[in-house]
Image: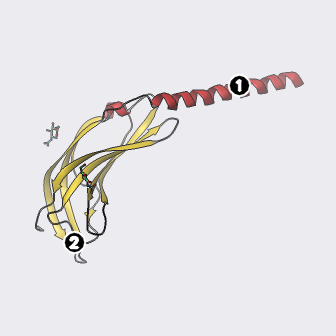
Amino acid sequence: MHSSGYRANALLTFAVTILALMCIIASFSDNFNFPSPSTQIQIMKFNWFQKQTHGNDEVSLTMNITADLQSLFTWNTKQLFIFVAAEYETPWNSLNQVSLWDAIIPAKEHAKFWIQTANKYRFIDQGSNLRGKKFNLTLHWHVMPKTGRMFADKLVMSGFRLPDEHG
Ligand SMILES: *[C@@H]1O[C@H](CO)[C@@H](O)[C@H](O)[C@H]1NC(C)=O
Ligand SMILES: *[C@@H]1O[C@H](CO)[C@@H](O)[C@H](O)[C@H]1NC(C)=O
């Protein structure tokens, strides 16, 4: 009885070791996936652009977001968290980042898409810096694995510009 308990324990230890080893191999083999995601974001229109009563600029815009993120999925990928941010410089901050839209992509089948959407989160500057402002639209993604470490990356699209006048 004593010895069979010992055997069961040894077997369990062995199983746990194998499982841990499989997890390590799984997350390690993920490092050999070289993804090639692509995206394109067009601004369809600026819906309105105003200065709030307390002075901050706010803009509403409609984007057409096209992306193919299928190559980010491996068998070890649980889901992707993605967001589009407007990024611009002001005299006080070298990087202002405003999240405009986000989504969770639960599976590879949903990772190739296009969507026309207005900004889901408000595009407000902490000041009045947006008139004629050049900005980038960046698609950020966080890959959430089934096992192992999360990783993040982004694609930057530059050359956008806000209107010169409120309206
Ligand atoms: C958005 O972009 C996609 C891919 O470039 C295009 O097929 C689609 O027609 C565009 N949608 C609109 C409303 O322009
Ligand atoms: C916008 O993108 C350009 C080109 O990638 C880059 O040089 C610039 O630093 C970016 N601007 C901001 C505010 O991130």
The Cα–Cα distance between marks 1 and 2, rounded to whole angstroms, is: 63 Å
- Residue type, numbered disc 1: Phe
Q: Is residue 70 left or right of residue 147?
A: left
Residue beneath disc 1:
14
Residue beneath disc 2:
128
Quadrant in which the N terminus appears: top right
Which colour assignment does the render follow? secondary structure
- Residue type, numbered disc 2: Ser
Q: Give the quadrant of residue 18.
A: top right
Q: Give the quadrant of residue 152.
A: top left
Front position in the image: 121 or 137: 137
Q: Is residue 138 left or right of residue 33?
A: left
How many neighbours does mark 1 have within 10 angstroms: few (below 14), some (14-19), or many (20 or more)? Answer: few
Residue sticking out furthest to the right: 2
Say which residue appears at 68% left-offset and 25% top-offset. 15
Q: Is residue 12 above or below residue 41?
A: above
Q: Secondary structure at mark 2?
A: loop
User: How many numbered discs sit on the rendered protein?
Assistant: 2
Residue sticking out furthest to the bottom: 54
Front position in the image: 133 or 121: 133
Q: Is residue 83 left or right of residue 75?
A: left
Quadrant in which the C terminus appears: bottom left
How many neighbours does mark 2 have within 10 angstroms: few (below 14), some (14-19), or many (20 or more)? Answer: some
Say which residue appears at 30% left-offset and 69% top-offset. 92
Q: Is residue 16 above or below residue 60?
A: above
Q: Is residue 141 above or below residue 15?
A: below
